[in-house]
Image (tube, rainbow, N blue to C red):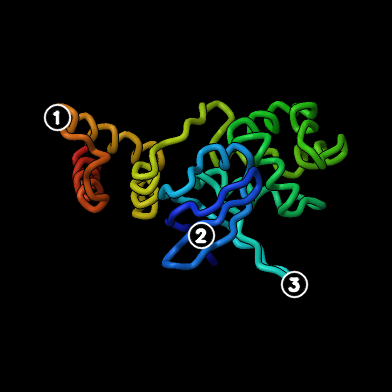
Amino acid sequence: MISLINGIVRSVNVDRAVIEVGGVGLSVSITGPTSSQLHLGAATHLFTSLVVREDSLTLFGFLDEESRNTFELVQTVSGIGPKVALAIMGAHNADSLARAIAQEDIKAIEKVPGIGRKGAQRLILELKGKISDLGGADRVHSHQPVWREQLTSALVSLGFTAKDSDSAINEVLSTYAEAGVDAATLDLSELLKATLAQGRRS
């Protein structure tokens, strides 16, 4: 399973990008909002989901892990495949979709191309209570820097909760800021050590 790629953007369209990873160009299906964040020749970091069919292998890419997880969860709804799931993620981020489902806002979901009223009702019925586990409808979504997403993922994999990792990272950033150091210029391993130490103290 290819779940993460780091590489250089070699081509970008509204629905597709080619990312060069180790000399190989990977074609990745993306949403319009993701496309607007990618720049030719620039390095990028995408959370990916590989969909395997008898006649194809399709890689779908997202700017954050939460969107990738929501994309995969949406496909557990009967009648929704990867193309419709990608259209949903193009119209909603993880939080706005969670909010629409929690509030049973059929109109907000019907705006997605390929989703009619029955599809919206089925989405709400099958995902209510599940999608909130991925983020919660009451939290405002904001795109974080890549290094911070990587650091958060590393901490969560080591047993931190999302809230604890966020708190520990903020403490470390504050300490670096007081010393006049930009955390974005440091190695991820150094940031991880400092954040783990902070997490143990708190």
Camera-side mark, 2 or 1 = 1
Q: Which amino acid type corresponds to the residue marked 3 in the rendered image?
A: Asp
Determine whether label 2 and label 3 are within 8 Å by CB: no
**143 shown above or below 41:** above
In the rendered image, which residue does mark 1 sit on? 180
Q: Which residue is mark 3?
A: 55
Counting residues from the N terminus, which is met first, the one under dot 2 or under dot 3? 2
Q: Is residue 50 left or right of residue 121?
A: left
Disc 2, SS = loop
6 vs 50, left or right, is: left
Which residue is under mark 2?
A: 3
The label nearer to you, 2 versus 3, is 3
- The part of the image, by quadrant, that contains residue 158 is bottom left
Distance CA(mark 3)–CA(mark 1): 54 Å
User: Residue at the spot x=28%, y=32% of the render?
Assistant: 170
Please report whichever mark, 2 or 1, sits nearer to the chain's N-terminal start: 2
In three-dimensional space, the C-alpha distance between marks 2 and 3, rounded to whole angstroms, equals: 21 Å
Distance from label 2 to label 1 (Cα)?
35 Å
Q: Secondary structure at mark 3?
A: loop
- Neighbour class for label 1 at 10 Å: few (<14), some, many (≥20)? few
